[in-house]
């Protein structure tokens, strides 16, 4: 069972201080994965920044835009001149 817990702590240059929330309910002598994210940066991205992270290109045939019904739904390709 994977549990996720978000903690807020301050780094003094050597170690992370005790979490701002106080005592943490974690098992001792258990390895944990810690993900570090700067608190001030959270929520400061614009919508365009978020969308840019998901943009990319899709490889496809040269006639993809003209024959999308064929590639998506399996309808027969149009004959040249029927566009």
Image (tube, rainbow, N blue to C red):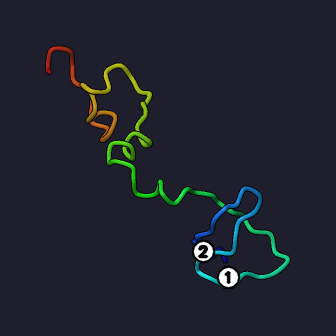
Going 72% across and 56% down the picture, which residue do you hit? 13
What residue sits right under mark 2 in the picture? 5
Q: Which numbered marker is on residue 24?
A: 1
Q: What residue sits 69% from the left and 75% below the top?
A: 18
The answer to the question of whether label 2 and label 1 lie on touching residues, with beta carbons closer than 8 A, is yes
Secondary structure category for the residue under label 2: loop
Task: Say few, some or many: other residues with alpha carbon within 10 Å of mark 1 (under 14 / 14 to 19 / 20 or more).
Answer: few
> Where residue 72 sits in the image (x, y, percent)?
32, 39
Q: Identify which residue, 64 or 3, lies in the foreground.
A: 3
Vertical placement of 60 versus 49: above or below? Answer: above
Asked which quadrant contains residue 24, the reply is bottom right
Residue 74, image x, y percentages = 32, 38
User: Which quadrant of the view contains residue 77?
Assistant: top left
Is 74 on the left or on the right of 78, as rendered?
right
The residue lying at 77 percent from left, 58 percent from top is 14
Q: x and y percent of residue 32 in the render?
A: 75, 68
User: Residue at 72% of width from left, 81% of height from top?
Assistant: 26
């Amino acid at each position: 069972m994977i549990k996720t817990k978000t903690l807020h702590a301050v780094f003094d240059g050597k170690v992370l201080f005790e979490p701002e929330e106080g005592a943490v309910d974690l098992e001792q002598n258990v390895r944990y994965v810690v993900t570090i994210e700067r608190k001030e940066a959270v929520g400061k991205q614009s919508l365009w920044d978020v969308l840019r992270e998901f943009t990319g290109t899709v490889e496809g045939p040269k006639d993809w835009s003209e024959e999308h019904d064929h590639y998506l739904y399996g309808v027969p390709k149009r004959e040249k001149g029927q566009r």
